[in-house]
Image (cartoon, helix red, strand yellow):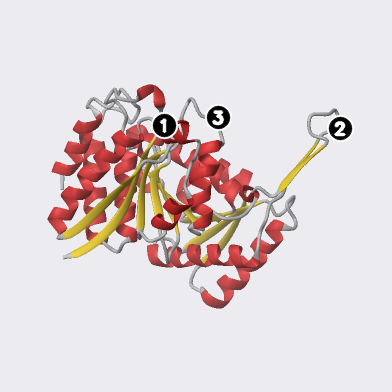
């Protein structure tokens, strides 16, 4: 029996609730497919920060580095100033664990929940590969004359050949593995960001021409990408982009697939500890009510199993999620599911 050590961070708000349901489903899949997941729980988030004034101890970072995967609920507390937890926990883990890929599948399970007219599941099935360690998110820059009428704020986008190339190679390999349309679209802004995306575009074509001749290479400005997400999402297979643009377009992708209640993502280090999470927030106003949708967290667990190589178990979870979404769920929004949070977890688990 294969055994995996998994770190669990329930986090804030409804995070612990949805993680509980994800683990419920993971345990059901583990039992069926003969694998073992050993969980180590970490108390990280707003409540801990308010008690200790420490977001993420150095010792915990080193411990998390040893796990193949981390399952995260949500980070964000109404009593903690915005940015403290996000930078102190999420961004720090992404950077220090070199989770240089943010992977966001955008897949429609039920056309009832798609806000786009006449779009069906076969029309919305693409993946966004977002660079996760560079760009505007490195924090490079600063202030001059802060607090005066002459204040200057500079935020610099850092793009290295190493960082860009490893992201592009991951995207090419994923496109090849999906073997759907074998088309990779670079989303950028070459007409304005003429330094950063000159590097991206040159590397994109050099790598594709030399090492992935079977993959069709496509380019779209990021503003055009958002238009096509809405008008013709079926045009996309895999999209690769930088940190900031990826952050923006994946939220639009979540709405196209039905909303935050179904959207999961992975922060990937292909050779190290990777972190999987529902991409919605902590939704503190719903804490403890049992009305939050756990499907995104369950899908995050499914992505985690797939990353670990347990593809059969991962596919079984996805199939159960699809069945529950199509046959049971009334809405993907909190409080409108037609079932409680734990009942949705039960439905998916029993569907295995």
Cβ–Cβ below 8 Å for labels 3 and 1?
no
Spatial separation of the CA atoms under disc 2 and disc 3? 26 Å
Residue 275 or 305: which is nearer the viewer?
275
Whichever of callouts 3 and 1 sits on the residue coming sooner in the sequence is: 1
> Would you identify the image quadrant in which residue 116 lies?
top left
Spatial separation of the CA atoms under disc 2 and disc 1? 38 Å
Whichever of callouts 2 and 3 sits on the residue coming sooner in the sequence is: 3
Q: Which residue is mark 2?
A: 150
Please, which residue is most extreme toward the bottom here? Answer: 210
Q: Which residue is mark 1?
A: 47
User: Where residue 52 appears, x then y in whole percent?
Assistant: 46, 36
Mark closer to the observer (3, 1): 1
Give residue 81's mark.
3
Cβ–Cβ below 8 Å for labels 2 and 3?
no
Residue 259 or 73: which is nearer the viewer?
73
The residue tagged with tag 1: helix, strand or loop? helix
Residue 6 or 103: which is nearer the viewer?
6
Image quadrant holding the N terminus, namely bottom left
Question: Horizontally, is 202 left or right of 37 in the view?
Answer: right
């Amino acid at each position: 029996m294969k055994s995996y050590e998994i770190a669990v961070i329930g986090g804030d708000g409804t995070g612990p609730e949805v993680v509980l349901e994800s683990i419920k489903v993971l345990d059901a899949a583990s039992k069926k497919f003969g694998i073992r997941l050993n969980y180590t729980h970490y108390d990280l988030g707003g409540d801990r920060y308010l008690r200790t004034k420490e977001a993420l101890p150095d010792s915990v970072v080193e411990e998390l580095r040893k796990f193949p995967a981390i399952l995260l609920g949500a980070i964000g507390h109404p009593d903690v100033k915005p940015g403290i937890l996000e930078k102190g926990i999420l961004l720090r883990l992404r950077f220090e664990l070199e989770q240089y890929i943010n992977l966001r599948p955008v897949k429609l399970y039920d056309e009832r929940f798609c806000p786009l007219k006449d779009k069906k599941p076969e029309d919305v099935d693409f993946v966004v590969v977002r660079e996760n360690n560079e760009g505007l998110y490195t924090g490079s820059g600063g202030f001059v004359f802060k607090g005066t009428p002459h204040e200057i704020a500079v935020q610099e986008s850092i793009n290295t050949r190493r960082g860009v190339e490893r992201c592009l190679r991951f995207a090419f390999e994923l496109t090849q593995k999906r073997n759907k349309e074998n088309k990779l679209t670079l989303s950028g802004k070459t007409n304005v960001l003429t330094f950063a995306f000159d590097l991206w575009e040159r590397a994109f074509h050099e790598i594709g021409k030399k090492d992935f001749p079977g993959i069709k290479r496509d380019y779209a400005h990021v503003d055009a990408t958002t238009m096509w997400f809405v008008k013709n999402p079926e045009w996309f297979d895999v999209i690769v982009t930088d940190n900031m643009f990826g952050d923006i377009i994946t939220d639009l992708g979540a709405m196209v697939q039905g909303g935050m209640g179904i959207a999961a993502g992975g922060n990937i280090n292909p050779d190290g500890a990777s972190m999987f999470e529902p991409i919605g927030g902590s939704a503190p106003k719903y804490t403890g009510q049992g009305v939050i949708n756990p499907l995104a967290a369950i899908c995050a667990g499914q992505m985690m199993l797939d990353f670990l190589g347990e593809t059969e178990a991962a596919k079984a979870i996805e199939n159960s999620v699809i069945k529950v979404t199509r046959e049971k769920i009334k809405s993907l929004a909190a409080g409108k599911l037609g079932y409680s949070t734990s009942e949705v977890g039960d439905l998916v688990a029993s569907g295995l």
